[in-house]
Amino acid sequence: MVSVNPYRFSPDDVLVQCPKILEDKYSTPSVIVLFTSTDSKKNSKMPSWTQTRTFFIGIFAGFFISFLIKKSIFGSFSFCIRTENNVRIVEDPFDIVGADRGMFPHNSDKNLVFIGVMTAQQYLDTRAVAAYETYAKQIPGKIAFFTSESSVTSSNIPVVRLKGVDDTYPPQKKSFMMIKYMHDHFLNHFEFFMRADDDVFIRPDLLENFLRSVNSSKHQFIGQAGRGNSEEFGRLSLLDYENFCMGGPGVILSQATLAVVAPHVGDCLRNVHTTHEDVELGRCVQRYAGVSCTWSYEMQRILYHDRSQDSFGGKLKQPELHRAITLHPVKNHTFMYRLHHYFQTLQVVSLETKLLQLVRELGALHRNTAAASHPLRLPNLDDARHGVFLSHLGREASLQAGAGRHETTVQAYQLVSKLLFSLDTANPKQRLPSYFNESLADVIAYTMHTINLASSKRGRELEYRNLLYSYVRHAPGTGMQLVLDLLLLYKRFRGNKMTIPVRRHGYFQVPFGPLYVRELPVPTKDVAVDHIPQPAAVVHFLLPLAGRIETLTRFLANYERVVLMQHERATLTIILYREEQRRSDTPSLDHGQAATDAESDVQSRVRRLTLKYPAALISIVHGEGEFQRAQALQLGAQQWPAQDALLFCVDVDMSFTSDLLPRLRLHTKLNAQVYFPIVFSEFDPSVAGAPPHDERGHTVVTEESGYFRSFGFGIMSVYQSDLMAVGGFNTSIRGWGGEDVDLYEKFVASKNLRVFRSSEPALVHVYHPPACDYRPVKDNSASNESPSLSDDRLKKTALSAGTQESQWSMCAGSVYSTHASKRVLSRRLLDDPSVLRYFAARRRPLT
C-alpha cells in the first residue's frame, strides 16, 4: 500500500472505479444506484414530470441505501478513489510536510518556524521546486507550498491545495486561508510562522539567529513596514498609527499573534477595503492582535527588496546581500540555485576561518609552553590519506615573514593608490585588476564587521568611507600582507552624539587557507590493436628577411642545431627582400651592389646547409618592392597551400630550443586553435649587463636578463586553412608593427577559432638596437618635417613613407621596455643623487 498526498495529484494518476467492496479498510465500495423495474406500459402512461420525479427519487434512494450498507459493514463512509497501484490517500497535514506530532518547540530545535509559501499552478514545477531544493532543506522547521484547489504537479514537494481557492491575483483569499491552515494544524508545534512568496530566497542560518532573539510568546508582527506609494497614499483606509508588512520580502508572525488573528480571518475577508492582500493582513493583525508591523529601518536591510531590472543576476558580492535574511524578488528560478551556491560558499569560508583561528590558538599555546618542563604537544592536524593539510595554519602572524636579509630575498610591496604600482608586472603603473580590488574589499568588509560587532552595546560605530592608499605583498608560505590607510567616520549615538572623520592605519595578514589535495583517476582509453601512431606534423618556418646577414648566420646556426641535427620534421622558407629597398626610396649604385652581395651571401649560406643535410628543405622566396612584414609572411604562406600545413611565423632575432617544436604542435589545433606564444625578450646589455646563457648558448630566463613580452603578437603558429579563414595578413599596413595586432584581433573575433597564449621560455628575442621611424601621411596642409627623438638609441631608418603615429607609439614603447628591469633602474636611480635632486626640483612649485 503506497501513500499519496491528495493535494499533489497529477494528471498521470489513473483513477478507476472500484469494481467491488474490498477488504482493505482504506477502500470503499462503489456507489450503487438501485433502479426498480416497472411495467413499460405503466411508464408510458406516466406524465413526463412524474417520470422525472421518479428518476430523482430513485437516485436519492440508491445513495441512501449505499450509505446504510457502508455504515453497517465498515462503520464509516467515504467516496472511493482507487488507482491502478492500489494507492492509499494521505490527508494528514503532518505527513504532507513531514512533521512529527510529538515534536514541539520545547523539546526540538527544529520546530522554530513554519514557512508557508504562496505559489500558483504555473510556478509549482519551477520556483517552488527551486526553493525546496535550495534553502528549504536547511530551515529550522518545516515548509509547505500553498496553491489553488485545482493545481496539480508531479514534483516531490510538500504541496497543500487550499479548498475553494483559485490562482487569481491578488491572492487575498489564498493568503488568509494559508494563515488559517497553519493555525488549525500547527499552532502549538512552532514558535513562529512565516508568510512568503515563491520568488523570495531565505537564508536559514540568519533567519534562525534572528528568530532566536525574538520572544514568540508576545504579539510580534515582523516585516518591512509600508503605508503605500505616493499614488496609494490615503487610499488604503489606514489610520495615522496603522501600517502593514509588505508581503514580498516576507512576513513573520509569532505564535501568540497567529493564535488571536487566525480565528477571525473570515471576518477580515468579508470586510476588505483594498485589493492588496498584505494591506488587509496588516489591518487584520492590527484589529485583533493590537500590533503594527515593526517600525524599524533595519527591516529594509534584513528583508531585502531589489528594485533593479535583473534582480540577483549580476554581482552577488555586495554588503547589502551579505546581511540580508530574505532576498526578493527572484523571478528567474535558476537564480535560486545561484544564490544558494554563493551563500554555501560563504559558509565554507566562515568555517575555514574558524578552523584557522583554532589552529592558531593551538600553535600559540605550543610556542608559549616550549620552554616549560612539560610543553604542550602540538597535535598532527594533517590527514594525508584524505588529502587535508592544516599544520601550516598554526604559524605566527607577522608582517616580517617576507622581510628577508638580502635584497634578492626581500618580497617587495605593491603600492595601491587608485592605480596599482608594482615591480612584478611589465607595466609598473596599471589599473587595479578585478581580483585585486575584490580582495581589498573583502579585507575591509571583514575588518569593519569585526570592529562593529559590539557597536550597539558601546554606543558607537565606525563607518568605512575610503581607502587612501595601501601596501600589499604576497609572502610565500604565509599569505597576503597589507598595510591600509583608511578614512573612517566615527559615529557616537549615546551621550554626547557626534560624527567626525578619522584616519587609521591597519596592518593585516590574510593567511592561506587549508590545503586540499585530491587525486583524480587517470582516464583509461581503449587502444585498437591495429592503431598506428600518426607522425608529428611538419612545422613550416616562415622567416621574413631584409639585410641582417650576421643575424641570419646566428639564426641558421640555431636552426641547424635544433632542427637539422635532431632530424625534426620542419622546413624553412626565407622571404628575402633587397636591402636597398628597405633603406632608401632612391637606391644608388653602391646600395644596389651591396644588396646584390647580401643576396648572394644568403644563397651561399643556404646552399652550404643543403649540401651538408641533403634531406633539409630550405627555400628562398624573393619579395618585390618595399619590405613589408605582412606582405612577406603572406607570400611565404602561399608557398604551402595545403590546408593542414602548420605555419610558424618567426623573426630572425629569435633564438629557440628543441622544446619549442613539440609545444607548437600541441598548442596549435586545426580548425580549433591558434597559438600566439609570449616570447622572452632580452634587456639592453649595456644597461642591465650581459644575460647568462646555458651550455647550449640559450639565454637563461631570469628577472634581470629580460621579460616576457605580453603585448607582442608577431610570433604565431597557425594552420594554413585557419589563416585563410580570417582573411590572412593585412598587406596594406606599411612600416613597423601593426600587422600582428590586426591579425590577432581577427582571430579573437572569429567564432570558430580560439586564441591560446602562454609564456614560452623556449623562444628568446635576442636584443638588438631598435629602429623606429615617424613619417606622417603627406597632404597639402601638413608639413613635410618629421618630429625627431631626443633619445639617440632610436635610429630613424626610413621604413615607409606612410608610418602612422600609432605604430610609432608602439615602437617607442617597445624600446623603452627593453632598457632594463625595474629593479635595476631603481637601483641606478638610488645610486645617483643627481637624478633624485632633479626629480625633487621638478616637484617644487615655481616662484
Image: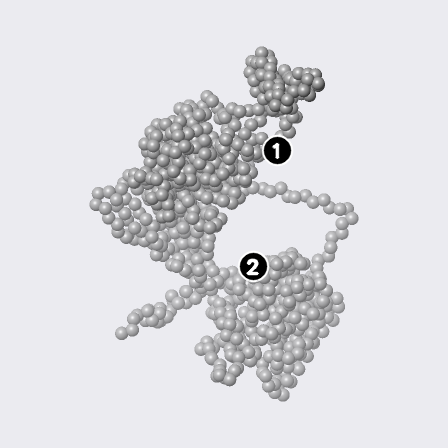
The relative height of residue 321 versus residue 487 in the rendered view (above or below) is above
Q: Mark 1 points at which residue?
A: 11
x%, y% of residue 481?
40, 50
Residue 387 makes an appearance in the image: no
In screen coordinates, is 91 left or right of 292?
right
Q: What element carries label 1?
A: loop
**Residue, far bottom:** 589
x%, y% of residue 54?
62, 19
The relative height of residue 43 versus residue 144 in the rendered view (above or below) is above
Which residue shows up at 64% across the image and 68% down it?
Answer: 728
* Front disc: 1 or 2: 1
The one nearer the camera, 488 or 532, is 488
Which residue shows up at 66% across the image and 18% down it?
Answer: 35
The one nearer the camera, 308 or 110, is 308
Residue 535 makes an appearance in the image: yes
What colour scheme governs how the chains and residues are painted in the rendered image of this protein? one colour
Where, by quadrant of the figure, is residue 846 drawn? bottom left
* Label 1 with label 2: CB-CB less than 8 Å: no
Which residue shows up at 34% across the image and 30% down it?
Answer: 289
In screen coordinates, is 396 left or right of 45?
left
The relative height of residue 327 versus residue 662 in the rendered view (above or below) is above
Where, by quadrant of the figure, is residue 203 drawn? top left
Q: What residue type is labelled 1?
A: Pro
Q: Name the residue under label 2.
A: 759
